[in-house]
Amino acid sequence: MNTTWDPTAHGVLRLPSGRLVRGRGLRSPLPPGPKPDFALYLRGRRPAPVAWEHQWIRWPDFWLPTDRQAFTNALHTLLARAGNERVEVACGGGLGRTGTALACLAALDGVPRAEAVTYVREHYAHRAVETPWQRRFVTRFE
């Protein structure tokens, strides 16, 4: 069984280690193809139920996660599982919160924090990480 994403598919970010993470917006339909094995959902409210394992982090639109330690722990889990499972990160539109989380993942995976937003904008979406405080959050993420 293939447990990774198609690296050429829209919304799939290849991290420096080669791990693949799909980012997406929950307001859009689920993309065709395989479902995730694990997902991290970043919303102000609990997302709709899904058939796969997932974790929800409360994160209001355009802001930052309300529980930063839970967010950090969730990213470590997601990164570890990305080694052999299909994982995704999603928020409402797939750019601000998702982009911020992907930039933090890139930093955990070896991209210097000061370059992580640029990395995600080049390899995921050019409008990722929408606000100045989200960009600052990435540069200070540990």
Image (spheres, rainbow, N blue to C red):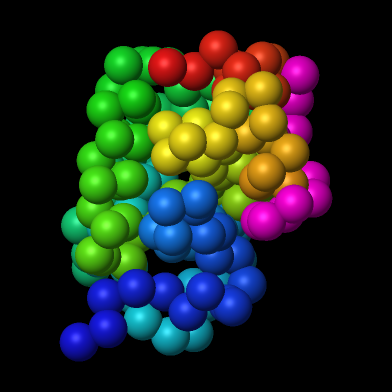
Residue 82: x and y, percent?
A: 31, 56
- Assign the magenta stretch its main secondary structure: loop
Left or right: residue 5 compared with residue 137 = left
Image-quadrant location for residue 63? top right
Left or right: residue 135 compared with residue 111 = right
User: Looking at this view, is 22 or 54 the one in front?
Assistant: 22
- The residue located at (55%, 59%) in the rendering is 13
Instruction: Indicate whether 4 appears above or below 107.
Output: below
- The residue located at (79%, 46%) in the rendering is 127
Residue 98 in view in this figure: yes
Instruction: Indicate whether 10 appears above or below 73.
Output: below
Instruction: Indicate whether 35 appears above or below 60.
Output: below
Residue 8: x and y, percent?
A: 59, 78
For the magenta stretch, what is the residue range?
122-132
- The residue located at (52%, 74%) in the rendering is 7
Residue at the right extreme? 126
Residue 101: x and y, percent?
A: 51, 37
Residue 26 in view in this figure: no
Image-quadrant location for residue 124? bottom right
Task: Decide whether residue 82 is among the magenta residues.
Answer: no
Instruction: Indicate whether 68 appears above or below 47.
Output: above
Instruction: Give the position of the N terminus as an image quadrant.
Output: bottom left
- The residue located at (52%, 60%) in the rendering is 14
Left or right: residue 123 compared with residue 137 = right
